[in-house]
Image (spheres, coloured by chain):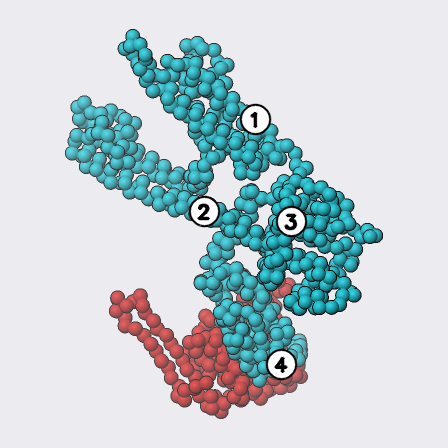
Amino acid sequence: MNWDSWPELVLIQSGKDSVEDEFELSTVCHRPEGLEQLQEQTKFTRKELQVLYRGFKNECPSGIVNEENFKQIYSQFFPQGDSSTYATFLFNAFDTNHDGSVSFEDFVAGLSVILRGTVDDRLNWAFNLYDLNKDGCITKEEMLDIMKSIYDMMGKYTYPALREEAPREHVENFFQKMDRNKDGVVTIEEFIESCQKDENIMRSMQLFDNVI
Amino acid sequence: MAAGLATWLPFARAAAVGWLPLAQQPLPPAPGVKTSRGDEVLVVNVSGRRFETWKNTLDRYPDTLLGSSEKEFFYDADSGEYFFDRDPDMFRHVLNFYRTGRLHCPRQECIQAFDEELAFYGLVPELVGDCCLEEYRDRKKENAERLAEDEEAEQAGDGPALPAGSSLRQRLWRAFENPHTSTAALVFYYVTGFFIAVSVIANVVETIPCRGAARRSSREQPCGERFPQAFFCMDTACVLIFTGEYLLRLFAAPSRCRFLRSVMSLIDVVAILPYYIGLLVPKNDDVSGAFVTLRVFRVFRIFKFSRHSQGLRILGYTLKSCASELGFLLFSLTMAIIIFATVMFYAEKGTNKTNFTSIPAAFWYTIVTMTTLGYGDMVPSTIAGKIFGSICSLSGVLVIALPVPVIVSNFSRIYHQNQRADKRRAQQKVRLARIRLAKSGTTNAFLQYKQNGGLEDSGSGEEQALCVRNRSAFEQQHHHLLHCLEKTTCHEFTDELTFSEALGAVSPGGRTSRSTSVSSQPMGHGSLLSSCCPRRAKRRAIRLANSTASVSRGSMQELDMLAGLRRSPAPQRQENHLNPGGGGSSELRSHHCTPA
């Protein structure tokens, strides 16, 4: 398998003439960095990277995932509810350079943190997910958005039936647990500290060791 | 798309880390399934062509042959590959399905072969991708229709003989529907045809003016009035025949209500009713006008020819199936006629002595112009009228030309279908004859072997060795099997000659039976009808005995074909066809183990 050794963004665009408007092809073909570089940057082995890339390339031949695709893919796993909002948040968490598309490097980087990172790394990643505006602290509104999106994924048919105030209550619980100085926002230090004190969370972190 | 799900699932699971800090309850432990990350390449050898793919690719669809453990049955440990003895070209499409998640339908392959491959590999036809789905469905439907056609044609056509216990009604109906089954039916068919022709010609000739022998009257009379008795007699004869035929058909019809409602019976009724009405109605002047009108209906007798002519039936069927196109044609024509008639009327209103006296009067002009007839009895004289008249004729050509190709193509399709049905019937006959020959060959080989004493336990000497030598392994085992059957049922296989001699009688019938039992009692009619000519049977037996060697070689193929036939849809029909060849199964069913 040949790997290019430099990152390349090849944009093939035909002219914008009126005649050729019908034949406008703009294929963005993104090739990832070399295997060695990715091995250095992430904690995956060579074989794991190969398998990951093969699957990724099969699904997205153009080499990148945009938000629509992402939402569609994620929604296949949650057929009962509406996962589009949460998928958007996830997309933003993976799209570290905020260019509107997730390339293979972003994808692998995110997975590396989640699956092979330390507990602190993972908690950091989770915090990054919740912090929608990436300002370093989670407000109640941000948390409420996240919570609502998660509850949306459940769909309508749940037991016991979902109540309107369930997300809000959940947010209150969360803040009670996490917000040490009760200033209405959760900073990264408070978050990590509180999580480390919680046994359940620590134990559940081990869930993700064998995903890949 | 299952392929997509399998690839993205690890990612979705990893993304669940986002729920961890929010979870109010402890999350469940992960399943212990450890997917082997060491991805291995599998080699699939399909008839010599090697396909290699990742194991993961095949695992995407675990409910198919290649994705499940079923493929282990095909694993060849010596070569380390999975060997399938199937079509490699078709396999390409199957494998691409695993790779891309879309099953494409090959355009140049037979659709049934494709279906069989799908069935083998455990793929449901619904998986065919959207791009190819419509074509796949169309081709499958066409195939199914063709097969259904065959079945219908065979059932309706000269099929198996009716059971002897069929009633007069059934035999009569069959004779009517299928004139070729017996000579009487054929005669009846031609006689009715002749009388229809006679009747129609009489109707026509009736109106020709005959010059009388004596030139006394200058007025020429039509023949009908010159020779009223002759024509009346002819008419009576024809109507009698038609009435008789109609009543017979009514009697023989399996479902009288349906028969009464059918088109052909309606035509029959319309053909004969005017005569009876004319008889009943007294000849007075008031109703003679109506009486004359009734005579017009006699021309419908010509439609009775459609029983005799398949082409006419096809035409009628075409018109029926193109009803919507014809309706459209009529509707659009009507619209155009009304529009143009109105326009022409108002355009020509001012002219003196104009023919366009009213809009309905202008209808005639419009029709004549649109169909490009142009009689010229009505012509516009104003300039505006001429302009609109020319527009009218141009548009007429267009409007009529549009639905016509649809009707034509429909007719062509139906006509070709009919041709195909006929051809297939002929082919089927030939094929069945071959199968019969093959079956008889097999049985004769066995009987020959027995005659030569091959089955005797105490056999010895060169003779036995001689006849044993030429048998293949297949034959040996087959004969052993037949022998076992004989021992089980305490009956033996013989040929028809011995059987007919044993019975001491020759029963009429058109079918021959090859495998019979010597010690059996006279059987029911269904299974044993020996040939009607014992001399022929003797000759046939001798000829066949000489040719068993060559025929039995080919018999394996034919037996395969038999098996294939049995697999085809409508197995119950096949029994009928195979029975004449001496289906051993049907006879053995009627055997019972009598103490010999």
Q: Residue B85 at what x, y percent from top left?
A: 57, 71
Give the structural element (helix, strand or loop) at label 4. Answer: loop
Give the camera-side residue of B365 and B249: B249
Q: CA distance from mark 3 to mark 2?
A: 39 Å
The answer to whether B55 appears left or right of B372 in the picture is: right
Q: Badge 1 is on which residue?
A: B247
What color was chain A assigned in the picture? red
How much space separates mark 4 and mark 2, taking CA atoms? Answer: 53 Å
**Which one is in front, B231 or B340?**
B231
The residue singled out by tag 3 in the image is: B538
**Label 4 belongs to which residue?**
B77
What residue sits 65% from the left and 66% below the top? B471
**Type of amino acid under label 4:** Ala
Task: Tell me how far mark 1 sits from mark 4, CA to CA.
Answer: 76 Å
What's the CA distance linking mark 3 and mark 4?
57 Å
Element assignment for label 3: helix
Chain identifier of the residue bearing label 2 in the image = B
